[in-house]
């Protein structure tokens, strides 16, 4: 590799660290928590979930009303390669599937949630509500 290639690669690295917003760390905690909470009515059909990332399959779980399923993981990012968890949900005759975590500041990219390392997804009849550790709550998806 000659010197001009080295310079190009160095400039690319500088570009990604300073210009790529996800590579900048303002609020990076050590540990992140995701909770799936069943907030569906007590007498309704059970909720089934399946959550996974590229590295971890967290398995299939049935949740009764007011039960939750949660997991923790460590901050781990190299440039734009980030931890990304996806969940599938089944309830009654409905199903839904979406990314529950892919952003170290706001749980998911472009979510309105203020900076947090706690991502609670509450499943209700009217959709999926995201709550941070302060209790800020937004409905992000409908069934
Ligand atoms: C989730 O369930 C556990 C065990 O039942 C409980 O200790 C915990 O407080 C629950 N978390 C939430 C957010 O409801």
Image: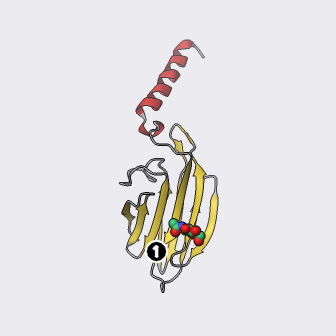
Circle 1: element type: loop
Q: Residue furthest front?
A: 134
Q: Residue furthest top?
A: 3
Residue plotted at (47% across, 25% down): 14
Looking at the image, what colour scheme do you see? secondary structure
Neighbour class for label 1 at 10 Å: few (<14), some, many (≥20)? Answer: many
**One can see residue 90 in this view:** yes
**One can see residue 52 in this view:** no
Horizontal relation, residue 8 to residue 58: left or right: left
Above or below for 137 versus 84: below
Q: What is the quadrant of the N terminus in the image?
A: top right
Residue plotted at (49% across, 20% down): 8
- Expressed as whole percent of the image width and height from the top left, the position of residue 93 reads 47, 80
Residue plotted at (56% across, 45% down): 30
- Expressed as whole percent of the image width and height from the top left, the position of residue 68 reads 55, 70
Which of the two residues, 44 or 132, is positioned nearer the viewer here? Answer: 132
Above or below for 137 versus 104: below
Q: Which residue is mark 1?
A: 39
Residue plotted at (51% across, 78% down): 65
Q: What is the quadrant of the C terminus in the image?
A: bottom left
- Expressed as whole percent of the image width and height from the top left, the position of residue 4 reads 52, 14
Horizontal relation, residue 58 to residue 127: left or right: right
């Amino acid at each position: 590799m000659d010197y001009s290639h080295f310079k190009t690669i160095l400039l690319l690295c500088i570009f990604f660290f300073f210009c790529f917003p996800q590579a900048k760390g303002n609020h990076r905690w050590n540990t992140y928590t995701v909770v799936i909470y069943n907030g569906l009515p007590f007498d309704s059909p059970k909720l089934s979930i399946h959550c996974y990332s590229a590295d971890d399959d967290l398995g299939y779980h049935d949740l009764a009303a007011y039960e939750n399923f949660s997991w923790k993981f460590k901050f781990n990012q190299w440039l734009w390669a980030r931890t990304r968890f996806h969940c599938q949900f089944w309830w009654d005759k409905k199903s839904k599937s979406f990314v529950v975590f892919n952003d170290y500041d706001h749980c998911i990219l472009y979510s309105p949630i203020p900076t947090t390392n706690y991502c609670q997804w509450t499943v209700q009849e009217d959709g999926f509500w995201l709550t941070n550790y302060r209790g800020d709550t937004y409905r992000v998806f409908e069934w």
